[in-house]
Image (cartoon, rainbow, N blue to C red):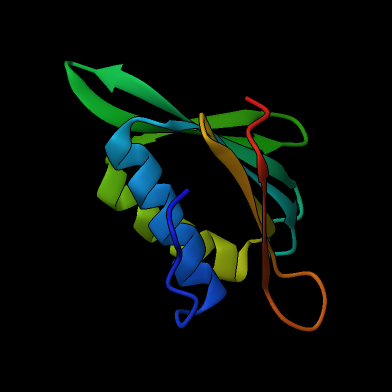
Amino acid sequence: MGPMDTGLPKLDQFLAAVEAAIADGSFVRLALRNPFGADKTLVSSDIKPVMVKGALKLAFTAHHKTRDLHDNHSPAETITALRVGLGSVFRQGFLYTTGFDLLYDTQGKSPRLKQSEATS
């Protein structure tokens, strides 16, 4: 991963990394964990790239206690959904790319980012 603008808030840095990974083709998947929102049946959400009618989409799978919900979004819609989701629904986002993994974590006093070697 290239140098991040550390002057930006941690969420903006994370979203910029997601956007760059989607754009350069290194995006493998994204996992949203540790829900704290109003929906008590929500367990987690996974996002993976898919091709739909020749266009890149991001397939969202929301895992609930008794069912899974699927939805496809454009890359721009994905960034908007992540900004909302990581602010009000999930405490953690795990970005997996071919070059690195990045954790966005809001548990604790302030948000943090942790980069590690690629596992996917």
Q: Judge whether residue 114 can be spotted in this image.
A: yes
Quadrant in which residue 61 is drawn: top right
Nearest to the observer: residue 52 or residue 29: 29
Furthest residue toward left: 54
Q: Is residue 104 above or below residue 55?
A: below
Left-right relation of 21 to 112 = left
Quadrant in which residue 110 is drawn: bottom right
Q: Is residue 96 above or below residue 49?
A: below
So how many labels did they put on this image?
0
Furthest residue toward right: 108
Nearest to the observer: residue 4 or residue 12: 4
Q: Is residue 38 above or below residue 57?
A: below
Task: Where is residue 7? Give x, y as percent.
Answer: 46, 83
Question: Which residue is painted at 45% across and 79% down in the image?
Answer: 8
Left-right relation of 104 to 58 = right
Nearest to the observer: residue 99 or residue 55: 99
Q: Judge whether residue 81 can be spotted in this image.
A: no
Left-right relation of 46 to 108 = left
Task: Where is residue 44? Give x, y as percent.
Answer: 69, 42
Task: Where is residue 32? Give x, y as percent.
Answer: 64, 47
Report the quarter where the C terminus lies. top right
Task: Where is residue 23? Give x, y as percent.
Answer: 28, 40
Question: Which residue is painted at 67% across and 35% down in the image?
Answer: 63
